[in-house]
Amino acid sequence: MRLRGIWHGSRHRVAWLGLLLMVVSAPGWAETSRSVATFDWGIAETLLALGVTPVAMGSVHAFHDWTGDTYASSEIIDVGVQTLPNLELLDRLSPRRILLPPRHRHREALMSRLGKTARLDHYPYAGGEGDFWPRMRAFTEEVGELVDKAPEARRLIRETAEHFDELASRLDGQVPPLLVVQLQDERHLRVYGEHSLFQAVLERLGMKNAWQGSTNQWGYTLVGLDELLTMEARLVIIEGALPVGIERHLSSSGMWRLLPSVRRGDTIVLPSSFWIAGTLPSANRFAEGLVEALAGVREVAGDG
Amino acid sequence: MADGALTSVSPARVCLLLGAGCLTLSLWRLGGGAGLIADLGALFSPSPQDTGQLLLHYAWWPRLLMALLAGGGLALAGVLMQQVLRNPLASPTTLGVAAGASLALMAARLLAPGLLVLGREWVALAGGGLAVGLVFLMAWRQGLAPVVVVLSGLVVNFYLGAVATALLLFHHESLVGLLIWGAGSLVQNGWDDLAFLWPRLLVGAIAACWLLRPLAILELDDASARSLGVSLRTLRLAGLGISVALTASIVSVVGVIGFIGLAAPNIVRMAGGRSLKQRLCWGVPLGGLMLAATDLLLQQLGGELIAAMLPTGAITGLLGAPLLLWLIPRLHLEQGRPSQTTPSLGARHSMPGRLALRLAIVLAVAVVMAVWLGQDERGWDWLSGDAWSLAEWRWPRMLSAASSGVMLAIAGAVLQRLSANPMASPEVLGISGGSAIFLVLGIFLLPSPTQPLLIGLGTLGALITLGLLVVMNRRSGFTPSRLLLTGVAIGALFDAVRSVLLVNGDPRGQEVIAWMAGSTYHSSATSALVVALLAGGLGAAAWPFARWLDILPLGSPMSRALGIQLSRARLTLLLLVALLTASATLVVGPLSFIGLLGPHMARLMGFSRAGWHLAGSALVGALLMVLADWLGRQLLFPDEIPAGVIASLLGGAYFMWGLGWRRG
């Protein structure tokens, strides 16, 4: 857990240093880079990773919750719920550019009264065809170009690739198939599969996702606990807005105790520091947390 | 009571048929794997190595038994409610028990999560009980007349729904689990829930049997029942108490299951089950079998055909709404008689013109406030020179709010006079609901919907609903009570569609919730002017009908005697109402009480004759919407509460408060 923080700290320092250099070398830059608004958390975290703090975003509290407070120190102005960002406040902030994911298309006309809008055509969770990583890279470059940070975007892509290679090398040997889930209540959970950030990360690290069923455009599907009983896989539980009292119900639930992974006692619980529809920064944090947890489990198993 | 076409069918045969269906589906499922005998054995002792058998033991068998138990329990609750209220349309969902329980659980999760650990069923019971209490309070003065009870239930459902929508808007991710619950899923993961439920249902069933004989007396009218020495009030309270407790315990375990409690007793009744005992003895197994059959079918379909989860509770709701539409013409509800309650809501004002002028002045003040007074990140601010551009955001919203308020209020005034029912409103007709179904489907099924496309879809939905209303009601001559019940069914259909779409927790769900909450958010100068023109035009079109609207509340015979062609007059007025409602719904969403509240308040102020009533309603509607929109933008700044939600909260509160003052 600590390790992850340190890695991030250094990343940020690099980013800030870069920003500082930019400010020194090109006056007027800081202002431009601060005048970007977005209401999508995936876009927001890519912006932050490129060294651009969006001036306004919806539901900032929830964003910090989901990203494990990685960006808690950045000064983003909360403009209200994501679905209805406050127009008057936005008008006063007068962002130069508003970055919209395709699902906010119906808001384009309204938003264009506030500033220049840009729809991100390569946004990775828009339901179209195509492999995940090429789309994610195209998206990152697209964002980079829109905020004049193309070199930073390319660097983020390169660094992510290197980071993944390094993480993959830490995973010596074969890891059994994993099943990435999020509990919704004591009988239902979301399982992540195709189109999801998590499956893409698993594949990139050379692991296998046990869930082969179809999923929605964010890459998950809602299932009853019983559908997992026959799956020979290690459970990766993503902790988030975990409903109260669920642990007690689960520990006494017949079905839960029978899940292969629970029987073996090798479930992995990851506190959420990544948004489920996140972009490269979330992918980095998820991969980091997962590899650490896998290594940890192996050590414990080795001790016993 | 209801002589259907099914007299050749007996309740036993219906049960047998459904039972055979369940058996076939079960055998289909059990036939695979280790063979039938071993699979049946898995009920008691599964072999721990065989995952197939474990699955049967921990998931399939408990799920089947839960469906039978929950269905039976809901049917029992329905039979009791219908008997106590002498109302074939009473049921746990129509009376708001489920909505109350659902909202109580949401509130508990957000405000006091500890309560949920202590016991979900108590939270659900309290919520459900309160909701039913509210319904009774509203219908008490009209002697719990069937239609009034169902309409009060609808109003309470609307109100609780508005609050729930607001909560969902701000806390979507933490309430996703409750969305699943609200859609009613029968998925089981062991025997715990069954162990929890069966003793409670057993106690309920014993109590119901014990009350059987006294309850049967309720089939007589009040006076005869009283002459037999029965305390009606105690009896009713006991019957309802049992019914609500049964529903709450079922709902707290499996979530909201629509329509079983309404449908099972009515099917038995139509199949010839006349006495209470028959309805109880056949209704309970029928309810269980109906739910089990639906659930088995969904399990069979679900995994193979559709990626998303199909929650059984919402699907029974989807199936139940057409059933209700089918039932309505076959139920004998009172028709065409003048309502005993309508006329004297308030004393007639001697000079309505002066009153209207005063209202107009208040409206002007509100308009100025809505445009000039607002907040920014530093605090309150009165609009001046440099910030003038903000007015360009505010005036279209203010104008759209006012216009939709005018349209809804006029629609409501027409409807209330037409139906001689102070509870009538356009929301109740289901036109808003029909429009909403199409919009929601558009948001979900189209990859990137544009605003004009969505507006087109919404209008199409409103028109289809209107067509349905006309076709369904033409033969009965557009009888008001029947018309309103059709609206109830369409509203239920909308709820079911929404539950199915939201249950999978799709982020698009948030867009849908934001739209349903009804906001002037998307208003632009052009759209606001269009809406204002529409409001003006349609409002003016309502004016010539004032004479009809003065006469129609006097009842059908009187109206006919005065030379009004009832069917045609009703159809014309209905069309007008539909157009008004559809236009307003596109701006403020399907939730709002303005159509109920505007005309009602205008009446209380003393606008009595139809012409003045229409004008007064329009003024009140505009004033309320402008205030609701402004409050919504200020209360939680920078978060916005949609105007529709605020209007619903204001309207619902007024309605309930007004009960204490209304003279019956």
Image (cartoon, rainbow, N blue to C red):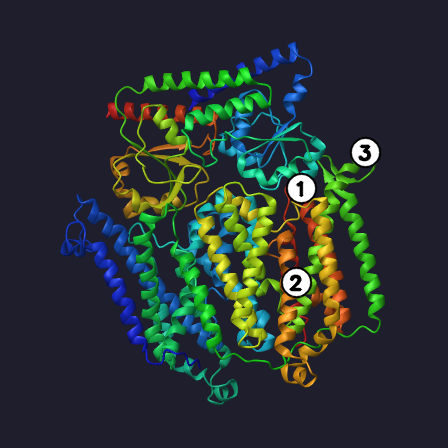
Element type at mark 2: helix
Q: Residues within 10 Å of mark 3 (few under 14, many from 20)?
A: few
Sequence-first disc among 3 and 2: 3
Q: Label 1, on which residue?
A: B637
Q: Label 3, on which residue?
A: B386
Amino acid at the residue labelled 1? Phe
Element type at mark 1: loop
Element type at mark 3: helix
Amino acid at the residue labelled 2? Gly
Residue placed most toward the observer, B359 or B54: B359
How far is the residue under mark 2 from the one under mark 1?
Answer: 27 Å
Residue placed most toward the observer, B462 or A239: B462
Instruction: Judge whether residue A274 can be spotted in this image.
Output: yes
Name the chain under label 3.
B
Instruction: Judge whether residue B654 can be spotted in this image.
Output: no
Residue placed most toward the observer, B651 or B429: B429
Left or right? Give the position of B443 relative to B364: left
Whole-percent x and y of residue A226? 30, 46
Sequence-first disc among 2 and 1: 2
Mark 2 and mark 1, same subunit? yes
Q: Residues within 10 Å of mark 2 (few under 14, many from 20)?
A: many
